[in-house]
Amino acid sequence: MGHSYAANAALKAEAVAAASGEPALGDDSGLEVEALDGFPGLHSARLAESQEERQRILFTRLTEKPRPWRARFVCTVALAIPGQATSWFSGERIGELVEPRSRGFGFGYDPIFWVPEVGRTFAEMESSEKHRWSHRAAAVRALIASGELTALASSTPRE
C-alpha cells in the first residue's frame, strides 16, 4: 500500500500496464471526515472486516463531536502508459455523514454519505444519478478534460 491515493492508484495502473504492455487505469478512493482530521482516509476500506463495523467505528468516534459531520469522498485515477510517466486525476464530493437511512442502491459508506445538493445519500440515488455526483465521476471527468485519452486514442494504431 502506498502513502497516498495517487500512489495506490499508480501501483494498480502500473502493474496492469507492465503486465499487459497496454495503457491501464487504476484508482483509489476514501472517505475523509472533517471532525476526525481526515479519518479514515486511506484506510477507509480496511478499517474493519464489514461495512457495518466500519460505520460503527466512525459513529463511535463521532459521538462527542458536534454535528453536522462534514466529510468528503476523494478519488484519484492514475493513467499508466508503458514508456511514459503516469498521470493522476482527482475528484471529490463534499457532503455530510448521517445515521444510516437506507440500504438502497449503494454499498460501502453510501448509506451514510449525504449529498446536500441532491438531498439524499448516495445509497438513495439511482446509479445514473450517483455517477453524476460521485467523486469517481469527478476524477474521470478530470481525466477526460485533460485530453490524454483523446491523444492516446489518436496515437494508437488501428487494425
Image (cartoon, grey):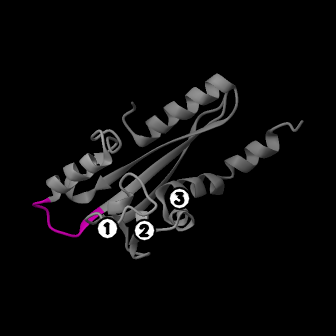
Q: Residue 16: within the magenta?
A: no
Give yes or no for contact between labels 3 and 2 (Cβ–Cβ under 8 Å): no
- Picture coordinates of residue 27 (x, y %)? 51, 42
- Residue that badge 1 annotates: 101
Callout 1: helix, strand or loop? loop
Question: What label does residue 138 carry, if any?
Answer: 3
On residue 124, the disc is: 2
Q: What crowding class fits label 2: few (fewer than 14 Cα within 10 Å), some (14-19), or many (20 or more)? A: many
Q: At x 62% / y 24%, what residue is drawn?
A: 18
Up the image or down, 129 lies above or below 148; here it is: below
Label 2 element class: helix
Q: Which residues are magenta?
A: 63-70
Q: Mark 2–mark 1 contact, CB under 8 Å?
A: yes
Which residue is the extreme one toward the left?
Answer: 64
Label 1 crowd bin: few (<14), some (14–19), many (20+), radius 10 Å = some
Which residue is pictured at 20% across the width and 49% down the height? Answer: 57
Q: Nearer the viewer, residue 120 or 90?
A: 120
Q: How many neighbours does mark 3 have within 10 angstroms: few (below 14), some (14-19), or many (20 or more)?
A: many
Answer with left or right where residue 133 lies relative to residue 46: right
39 to 4, vertically: above or below: below
Identity, as a three-letter code, of the amino acid under mark 1: Arg
Can residue 23 be seen in the rendering of this structure?
Answer: yes
